[in-house]
Amino acid sequence: GGDIAGGGMSGVGGGVAGIMDAFGKFHAAGAANKEAGFARQLAEVEARQKEELATWQHAISQRRGMRAQDEGRRVAGRAMALGAASGAGGIETPGLFDVVAGIETDAANAYATEMALGKQEAANTRYGADVRRFTGDVEALRKKNEARGLMLSGIGSGLRGFSSFRFG
């Protein structure tokens, strides 16, 4: 009656279902491959944003350090001027010399601290960029493996579908 060389309708229906399942899995595999590419692209964009932020962090710390150093020089100059105006003597006066030297040392330390902190902050942010690239690569690999699994499953479904047909 309604069979293909004795296979019956259930053979045809099962075969068609297997083939349709295979096409569905192939389509899903293609989507997973696209998602892998998107995951990697997104990670790269986010990593570049972090690297740009790191550059700004370093520049801001340099500016803060220079501001601290300039402020120290200004205060030291003011101390020398006040010392000279008060009759306490010039920079040669031991007490005034110690005060000015202390101010300049503090300013130099503030500069060095700002530079070190900014460098470390920028390094941490750059490390975050590297980590983001790595997690993007891992996500992309996971999606690629998902796609491979779907392809293999689709091949199996297709083969089962074709094997249910009876020809001849």
Image (cartoon, helix red, strand yellow):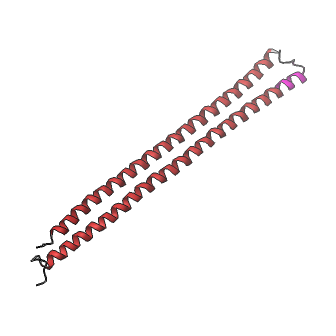
Q: Position of residue 13 (x, y in %)?
A: 19, 76
In the picture, measured across the screen, residue 128 lies left or right of residue 66, that is: left
Relative to 41, residue 10 above or below: below
Q: Which residue is nearer to you in this view: 153 or 53?
A: 153
Q: Which residue is nearer to you in this view: 96 or 25?
A: 25
Indicate the quadrant where residue 151 lies.
Answer: bottom left
Relative to 61, residue 24 above or below: below
Residue pictured at 69% horizontal, 27% vertical:
108
Magenta-highlighted residues: 78-88
Indicate the quadrant where residue 95 lies.
Answer: top right
Q: Position of residue 153 (x, y in %)?
A: 25, 60
Residue 152 sits inside the magenta stretch: no
In the picture, measured across the screen, residue 29 lies left or right of residue 61, that is: left
Q: Position of residue 34 (x, y in %)?
A: 41, 59
Query: Which image quadrant: the N terminus?
Result: bottom left
Q: Among all residues in the image, which is located at the extreme front?
A: 168
Q: Among all residues in the image, which is located at the extreme bottom?
A: 1
Relative to 18, residue 88 above or below: above
Residue pictured at 59% horizontal, 45% vertical:
53
Indicate the quadrant where residue 25 lies.
Answer: bottom left
Q: Position of residue 72 (x, y in %)?
A: 75, 29
In the picture, measured across the screen, residue 80 lies left or right of residue 154, that is: right
Query: Which image quadrant: the C terminus?
Result: bottom left
